[in-house]
Image (cartoon, grey):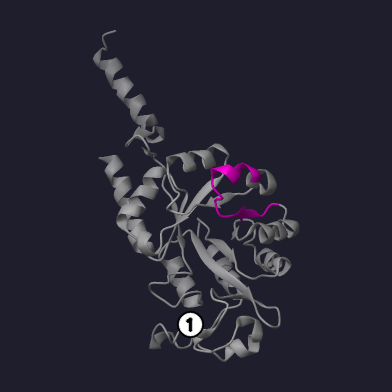
Amino acid sequence: MKLTNYNATTFLLVLCTFLPAIDFAQDAAEKIVYRFPEISAHRGASRSAPENTLASFSKAIGLGAGFLEVDVRTTRDEAQVCLHDGSLKRTTGVEKKITEVSVKDLRALSAGSWFGKEFAGEKIPLLEDLCKLVSAANKDRSRHIKLYVDCKDIDASKVVRILRDHGVLDSAVFYGNLTTLARIREHASTARLMPAYPGVADARSVIRQLKPYAFDVSPSELDDAVVRFCHDNRIKVFTDLLDEYDTPQQYARAIRLGVDVIQTDDIIAVQEEINKQKGSQIK
C-alpha cells in the first residue's frame, strides 16, 4: 500500500512513540534495551571520602546516587555498625576484631585518618546514624534514597527494627547468604531480598524458596539471557562494576543489557556514561 504524506507522518509518529520500548540487536548474544539503571554507591562515595562513614554517605547523596550500599556488622555489645571488614585494622589502625569492641570503644577511634587528614574526625557510624541521615535527606527530595544493606554479620531483628523505626525499611534491599536473608524475612515479611545469582541451574529453586526482589549478578556472568530470565520472573538485576570491571566499556555494556542497578566506586563516571547513552538515543 502506498503511503500518503499524512499516513507516512502518522506512521513515523507512532513508531517514535514506541521506539524506546523496542530491543535492537547488537549481536547474536546481546541486545540493546532502552532502560536506564540506578546507581548504588559502594560503601558511599568511597572515591571521595573514607568508606562506610557519614562523610562518604553524605557525598554520595549529593552526587545523586539512588542507593547507598552499607556493610553491617555487630559489636561486642551487639550494636549494628557500618563496617566492611571483620577487623578494625585497615580503617582505624587498631588490631582488634569488631566483635571485641564496644560502641564506646569505637567512639575513640578515627575511621577517616587513613583516607586523609581532613577526615580524621570521622567515626564508624551506627546503623542508626546512617538511617537518620537518609531519613532527613528524603524529606527534601521527591526521589528517595534507598539503602542497600550488605549483611556481613548482623542481628536480623535489630537491623529490621532500626530501619523500620526510621522509615527506610520498605525501600531497602538486603544482600546476604540465604540463611541471613531468611532471617530478615522472618522479621519483615515484605523485605526486599537479594541473594547472589546462583547460576541458571539453581536460580529457580532460589526463586521458589526466597521470592527475591533482585539478584546480584557478577559481571562475569552478566549477559542478555540472564537479564531476560530475571526480568521475565519479575526480578531486578544488580551488578557490581568494581575493580577490573570499573571501566566505561563495562558501564556501557551493563546499560545496554538493561541492568537495573549498577554498583560503583565512581558515581560520576557511571552517571556520565548513562547520560551519554541517553544522548545517543535522542540523536
Task: Give percent across and percent down for residue 277.
Answer: 31, 47
Q: Is residue 199 magenta?
A: yes
> Between residues 44 and 178, which one lies in front from this camera angle?
178
Q: Would residue 155 be found to the left or right of residue 48 on screen?
A: right
Under mark 1, the amino acid is Arg
Task: Give percent across and percent down for residue 242.
Answer: 41, 62
> Between residues 120 and 177, which one lies in front from this camera angle?
177
Quarter of the rendering containing residue 126: bottom right
Up-down: is 125 above or below 164? below
Which residue is the extreme one toward the bottom? 108
* Count of numbered marks: 1
Up-down: is 47 above or below 123? above
Q: Secondary structure at mark 1?
A: helix
Quarter of the rendering containing residue 28: top left
The C terminus - image quarter: top left
Residue position marked by numbered label 1 in the rendering: 90
Q: Which residue occupies 36% across, 57% down?
A: 271
The N terminus - image quarter: top left
What crowding class fits label 1: few (fewer than 14 Cα within 10 Å), some (14-19), or many (20 or more)?
A: few
Q: Which residue occupies 29% across, 46% down?
A: 279
Task: Give percent across and percent down for residue 83.
Answer: 55, 75
Q: Which residues are magenta?
A: 190-205
Which residue is the extreme one toward the right? 186
Task: Give percent across and percent down for residue 102.
Answer: 66, 86
Q: Which residue occupies 45% across, 61% down?
A: 65
Residue 258 visible (yes or no): yes
Up-down: is 66 above or below 50? above
Residue 274 visible (yes or no): no
> Between residues 80 and 152, which one lies in front from this camera angle?
152
Which residue is the extreme one toward the front? 201
Q: Is residue 196 magenta?
A: yes
